[in-house]
């Protein structure tokens, strides 16, 4: 079945360092979404990418959707302690309504 | 708007018991879904619905039933609880693009933490 893998599983960074998480799907995706989940909380939507090669920015966060629409990345510039949490990607394939979530990357930021 | 609400917040069951997890949304979203999240893991889709009267299975549907009699409500029923169903359950809702089926941002409820002894 369809699988969505994320790497790395964990990342510890010093405050101010950059951070990147990568999402790879076994199948071509119709769109991809990114979510952030704080410890003990629920996932909160960050962004949705739809077009091949799309790049979107939100302040210090940059999101990319691969040309083949099978991979995506989230890059955070100059991390802050408020960035702590687990980042998930979630993809949906054309013709289905089933979102498949990635395995997540847990980010810790050391002050 | 209350957004997506879930009840109860916490529940402890004994093996073999049944129960219903409630989920409601007040945003008139067509799409609703149930996920389970096990410790340190991602979310796995249990069941989803693209509108009232329409439901379908996700990745891990065994042991769970759903129904969607109204746009607002999407209850999840555990038929005979097992320790393997100990998890955090999240309900989510979103708009659906009628033409592309691509969906939109999912709004998640606060979750139900279920323990099965």
Image: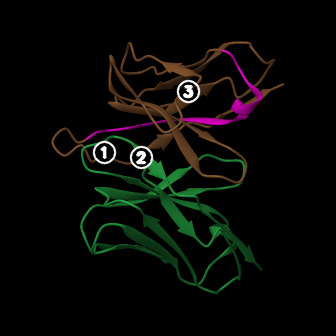
Chain colours: A green, B brown
Residue nearer the viewer, B24 or B14: B14
Q: In the current view of this chain or complex, which residue is farthest to the left?
A: B99
Quick one: label 3, few (<14), some, or many (20+) residues within 10 Å? few
In the displayed structure image, the side of residue A95 where residue B21 appears, left or right: right
Using the numbered discs, state the Cα–Cα distance from disc 1 to disc 2 in whole angstroms. 10 Å
Q: In the current view of this chain or complex, which residue is farthest to the right?
A: B117
- Magenta residues (range): B80-96
Quick one: label 1, few (<14), some, or many (20+) residues within 10 Å? many
Q: Residue A99, labelled with which disc? A: 2
Rendered-image quadrant of the C terminus of chain B: top right
Residue shown at the point (25%, 50%) measured from the top left: A94
**Are both tags, 2 and 3, on one chain?**
no
Q: Is residue B75 visible?
A: no
Residue shown at the point (54%, 35%) measured from the top left: B60
Using the numbered discs, state the Cα–Cα distance from disc 1 to disc 3 in whole angstroms. 25 Å
Residue nearer the viewer, B109 or A105: A105
Q: Position of residue B36 (x, y in %)?
A: 60, 38
Q: Chain of mark 3?
A: B
Q: CB under 8 Å between callouts 1 and 2?
A: yes
Q: Quadrant of residue A26?
A: bottom left
Q: N-terminal of the two: label 1 or label 3?
A: 3
Q: Quadrant of residue B110?
A: top right
Look at the numbered disc 3 and give the secondary structure of its residue.
Answer: loop
The residue pinned by badge 1 equals B103
Mark 2 or 3: in front is 3
Q: Position of residue A87 (x, y in %)?
A: 57, 62
């Amino acid at each position: 079945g369809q699988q969505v893998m994320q790497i790395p599983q964990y990342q510890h960074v010093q405050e101010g360092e950059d951070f990147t998480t990568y999402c790879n799907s076994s199948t071509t995706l119709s769109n991809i979404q990114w979510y952030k989940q704080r410890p003990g909380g629920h996932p909160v939507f960050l962004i949705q990418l739809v077009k091949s090669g799309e790049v979107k920015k939100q302040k210090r966060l940059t999101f990319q959707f691969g040309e083949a629409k099978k991979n995506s990345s989230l890059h955070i510039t100059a991390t802050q302690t408020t960035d702590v949490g687990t980042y998930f990607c979630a993809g949906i394939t054309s013709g289905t309504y089933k979102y498949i979530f990635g395995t997540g990357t847990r980010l810790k930021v050391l002050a | 708007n209350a957004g997506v609400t879930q009840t109860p917040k916490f529940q402890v069951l004994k093996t073999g018991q049944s129960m219903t997890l409630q989920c409601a949304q007040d945003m008139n979203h067509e799409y609703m879904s149930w996920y389970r999240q096990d410790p340190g893991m991602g979310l796995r889709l249990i069941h989803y619905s693209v509108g009232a009267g329409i439901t379908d299975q996700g990745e891990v549907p065994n042991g769970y039933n759903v129904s969607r009699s109204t746009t607002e409500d999407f209850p999840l029923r555990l038929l005979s609880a097992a320790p393997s169903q100990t998890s955090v359950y999240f309900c989510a809702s979103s708009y659906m693009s009628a033409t592309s089926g691509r969906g939109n941002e999912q709004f998640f409820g606060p979750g139900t933490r279920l323990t099965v002894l």
